[in-house]
Image: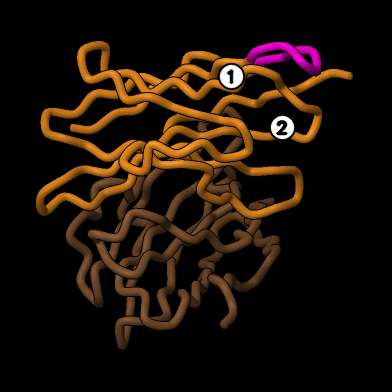
């Protein structure tokens, strides 16, 4: 079975503060991990994926296989980062099921 | 072209009625996913299609829920004898193929069962 856990439903920080959204996963094979974001009144969209090792809008995420984690980080939060963030896992091999966590609502206060 | 399109955007139905939700994926996308989004529950996986076949139906919550996809394109999610707990936003996503990692989401159908 594949499972994604986001322990924080809500996270509130001040502008300019560092932010970390936690994600832990459970999967027996080699998964692909993603972060999706949903801004107010917009569609859910891909933010970044672990295989690209990219930084998008200042966000980065490192896959830690030992801790089965894929935490999302940004050193200096901006008000426009306020949104719902979902961590997602896609199985490998013949399993292409895309499983999401319950999401973390990030609020960046001025 | 256009993104993933879902219809209707909003649906209010009486308890016990059947509803059909439609998803038009991006042209050429072979993978199609249905999710249910409700407050506090995040994105609940319902079913996944590869072409017209559904390798994984494990997320359908009960036998009142069914989905089909014809011609490798449009998909319909049907909920029979709706219950109040079925109220949620139903999201559809498509992907060029199972090996392509990005899923593109529709705007969702907000279902309210009264």
Residue A24 location in percent, x, y?
A: 35, 19
Above or below residue B97? Residue A22 is above
Q: Write the residue at 51% across / 48% down.
A: A46
**Residue A12 on the magenta segment:** yes
The brown chain is B
Q: Which one is nearer the viewer's eye here, B2 or B19?
A: B2
Residue identified by numbered label 2: A81
Residue B80: image quadrant is bottom left
Asked which quadrant contains residue B57, the reply is bottom left
Q: Nearer the viewer, residue B39 or B104?
A: B104
Instruction: Point out residue A96 in the picture as x, y percentages from the top left corner.
Output: 22, 52
Q: Magenta stretch?
A: A11-18
- Nearest the eye: A52 or B82: A52
Picture quarter with the C terminus of chain A? top right
Q: Is residue A109 magenta?
A: no
What is the CA distance from the residue labelled 2 to the residue labelled 1?
16 Å
Badge 1 density bin: few <14, some 14–19, many ≥20, Cα 10 Å: some
- The disc numbered 2 marks a residue on which chain? A
Mark 1 residue element: loop
From the image, tell me which residue sits under label 1: A9
- What chain is the orange one? A
Label 1 marks a residue whose chain is: A
Residue B80 in view: no
| N-terminal label among 2 and 1 | 1
């Amino acid at each position: 079975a594949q499972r994604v856990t986001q322990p924080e439903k809500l996270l509130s920080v001040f502008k300019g503060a560092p932010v970390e959204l936690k994600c832990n996963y459970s999967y027996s094979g080699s998964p692909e991990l993603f972060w999706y974001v949903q801004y107010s009144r917009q569609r859910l969209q891909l933010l970044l994926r672990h295989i690209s090792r990219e930084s998008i809008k200042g966000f980065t995420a490192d896959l830690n296989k030992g801790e089965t984690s894929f935490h999302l980080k940004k050193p200096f939060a901006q008000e426009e980062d306020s949104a719902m963030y979902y961590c997602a896992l896609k199985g490998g091999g013949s399993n292409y099921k895309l499983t999401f966590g319950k999401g973390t609502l990030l609020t960046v206060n001025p | 072209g256009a993104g993933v399109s879902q219809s209707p955007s909003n649906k209010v139905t009486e308890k016990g009625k059947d509803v059909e939700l439609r998803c038009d994926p991006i042209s050429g996308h072979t993978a199609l996913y249905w999710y249910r989004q409700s407050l506090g529950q995040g994105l609940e996986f319902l079913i996944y299609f590869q072409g017209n076949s559904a390798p994984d139906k494990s997320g359908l919550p009960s036998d009142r829920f069914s989905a089909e996809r014809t011609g490798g394109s449009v998909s319909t999610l049907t909920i029979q004898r709706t219950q109040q707990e079925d109220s949620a936003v139903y999201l559809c996503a498509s992907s060029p193929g199972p090996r392509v990692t990005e899923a593109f989401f529709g705007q969702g159908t907000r279902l309210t069962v009264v």
